[in-house]
Image (cartoon, coloured by chain):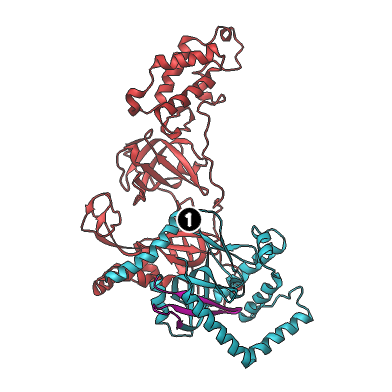
Chain colours: A red, B cyan
Amino acid sequence: MRGIGGGAEVSLVYRTPIRLFFGYSHSMLLDPVEPTDDSNSDIHTMSSNAKSAESAVGVSDADLTETATSLIEQFPDDAGDDLPSVEDVVARLEVMTNQYKVPLEEARHAATNHYRDVLGLEHDDLDYPGQSAGDVTLGSIDQDEQWVDVTVKVVELWEPTHDSIDQVGLIGDESGRLKFTKWAKAELPAVEEDGVYRFSNVITSEYEGRYSVNLNSRSKIEPVKDDIDVGADVEDVELSAPMVAIQSGSGLIKRCPAEDCSRALQNGQCAEHGEVDGEFDLRIKAVFDDGQRVQYAIFDKEATEAITGVTLDEAIDQAMDALDTSVVEESFINALVGRYYRVEGSIVGRYLLVNEAEQLE
Amino acid sequence: MSESESTSSSTENQNSNDGQQGRQVAKRAFAAEINDSTHVFKQSDEERAPNFALLPSGEIANRYFIVGTVTEVNDVGNDDEYWQARVVDPTGTVFVYAGQYQPQAAAFLSSLEPPAYIAVTAKPSTFESEGETYISLRPETITHVDNDTRDRWVAETIERTEARLDVYEQGDSEFGAMAGEHYDADPDTYREAVNEAREDLGMDVIPVASDDSTADSDDMDDEHVEEDEGEDDERTAEEAEIAAAVANADIEE
């Protein structure tokens, strides 16, 4: 049978049960003030179900003021002069509650959305302290759009793919690893590889069954002294499929030498630091495809050397001889694309970071 | 040097664009089915919407991954080089064409010495000649592979094709109704093609439901036809026509 085995093993087989490629999360919106949310009930003593004598006389000034104050606190500080005053908000709530008999929580919800529209802010720009799940471990994150606090080590930093992203990479704690994205407009301090930090008020997101955390303008970063022993990958997978393409930016590349940067250079330019004298590195951005699913994969220097048998020094020699670094990428395409592989590694975002790969004979 | 830089970036930009938008999978199909998948359409009106070929087995393909034997390579271009490769699998032959817009593939084919096993990731398109619609494949990547890879691909494509036909016959294919509308295809045609692939690998042949005595005699007729010299001449003439038509066709990029 020439060792074909009926081809049954030729497929993207994921060893661990992870949810893949199913529907996109509908990021909609948790009601900012859920009536059932205990953490808010002590603040908002007035509920729509209240049958106390107090309800007959309406909502007290004290409750209105407290609600108005906490509402304003949800808005980012940099909204500045445009922020409504406590008096404005109280007046708006007063009309809705005592004149139109709207429950206070509903009035607060409506007022929040009103000011959000007026200020041109997105849902994510607001802080919903009542929604925060507090301190969690990365492995326990299983909800989209949840505000959490995590204490993590930065395992890897990657090149941002867009100007709107300040830093992106992999964070880990004892329970696992997840992708994180720090948005440029958040204007947060830079994190470093191997640094340990407490990220507070970060929001989770889900894409194709995989979770990541986002740091936005409501988030905080504080360095932490204790080291963290980052646990095994939560999404360690193995697949068998042919490599159908190698993407540009593979082969012999140069990275920015600036501290904490390591972005891949394009035509000698770093997106952050301009023209720099880069440092050579090897990598492969590969596409695996079993006819049913596409899996992007990244081979780092070690994995690239292992699968190609070409060391970084040899690749540099090849490029020197040809006066052109692209010969390395071309030789990798010719040597690797079209063959079937068994690949093992961790899934991060849409990439599989290759740990081990071997050609199927 | 500058030339090779520009050529490599032009093909790779296509790839990375695909990546940004969520790359389309490369379907596995044998020549027998690819050549019948002549209805090519877009799923949206957007200008850059991808083309899909409708497979008779009720799926659609924006690209294929095929592995086969190149038996012949010809420059069929008029002024510019335009390379045509015949790529053979156990069920038939597909035609891969590469010109100035596929510089790496064109360079690969121009220096290829048949017979050789190759793996091709390619996009399908159609062209018309004498009222007939033909499929041409536009390569994104072509590489040399070995016999083991070729056999593995045949095994995988048997599996995928059988799975597609099963779903189609159960009436569960997303594009099954569309396939029924556009093609007057008998799924058994492709079951028989799969059996040719099974025989190629030394696997057991699965009897086709309607594969009775008539079908058997059809097979025998086919064999006779292949040995018929007059038919060969006709085929050669037809291929020359196809090649000329492709070379002249305004191939969509």
Examine the rendering and report whether any part of residue A339 can be seen.
Answer: no
Q: Is residue A108 left or right of residue B79?
A: right
Up-down relation of residue B240 to residue A23 (above or below): below
Q: Per the image, is A111 magenta? A: no
Residue at image coords 23%, 50%: A273
Relative to the observer, which residue lies in front, A274 or A260? A274
Q: Which residues are magenta?
A: B74-100
Q: Locate residue A226, reporting x and y percent.
A: 34, 40
Q: Locate residue A204, reporting x and y percent.
A: 46, 40
Q: Residues within 10 Å of mark 1 (few under 14, many from 20)?
A: few
Relative to the observer, which residue lies in front, B70 or B81? B81
Label 1 sits on a secondary structure element that is loop
Up-down relation of residue B196 to residue A27 (above or below): below
Residue at image coords 56%, 87%: B236
Q: Is residue B82 left or right of residue B172?
A: left
Farthest front residue? B130
Q: Per the image, is B98 magenta? A: yes
Residue at image coords 52%, 16%: A96
Q: Quadrant of the N terminus of chain B?
A: bottom left
Q: Locate residue A211, reporting x and y percent.
A: 48, 45
Q: Locate residue B164, reporting x and y percent.
A: 65, 65
- Name the residue that disc number 1 marks: B47
